[in-house]
Image (spheres, rainbow, N blue to C red):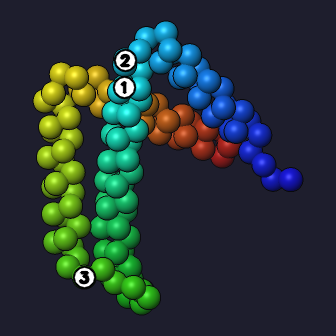
Amino acid sequence: RQVPVIAVLASVLFGFAATVMELLFPDRVLPVLLNIVGSTCLLVWTLSLVSQLVLRRRADRLGTRLPFRMAGFPWLTCCALAILALIFGLLLSEPHTRLQFLSMVALTATIAASSAIARRMRRA
């Protein structure tokens, strides 16, 4: 059936847990979750821009013909990355968003390290 049952169950359980936590601690859980989600979206945009920068340069170096080429490359990409860096700096400067941002960074680092370890274990 190709349904990710474990992922769906984990998402549902997390949703129930978050709802119960919000009921137990009103106005504390939801803002934290929203800040983490917002930071994660910014991280995804950052990784997309960095990937675009690296892969476009690689394609140009190899002479690969791309069906769509972004206008303003690489300046527009670098400008967007600078804006995201400014936003990350603002998140770090505010006490009420710093913990959520650092939590997102720690979670991302943990996932990246776990992925690297799993990849090495599969090769061995």
Report crowding for label 3: few under 14, some 14 to 19, many 20 or more residues within 10 A (C-alpha).
few
Q: Which residue is mark 3?
A: 71
Residue drawn at the location 86% of the way across and 53% of the way down:
1
Q: Which residue is mark 1?
A: 32
Report crowding for label 2: few under 14, some 14 to 19, many 20 or more residues within 10 A (C-alpha).
few
Q: Is residue 103 visible?
A: no
Q: Which residue is mark 2?
A: 28
Distance from disc 3 to disc 2, alpha carbons, whole Å, reads 43 Å
Q: Earlier in the sequence, mark 1 or mark 3?
A: 1
On screen, 64 above or below 104?
below
Q: Is residue 108 visible?
A: yes
Image coordinates for residue 113, horizontal then vertical, percent? 48, 35
Pointers 1 and 3 in contact (C-beta within 8 Å): no
On screen, 123 above or below 60?
above
Residue drawn at the location 30% of the way across and 67% of the way down:
53
Pointers 2 and 1 in contact (C-beta within 8 Å): yes
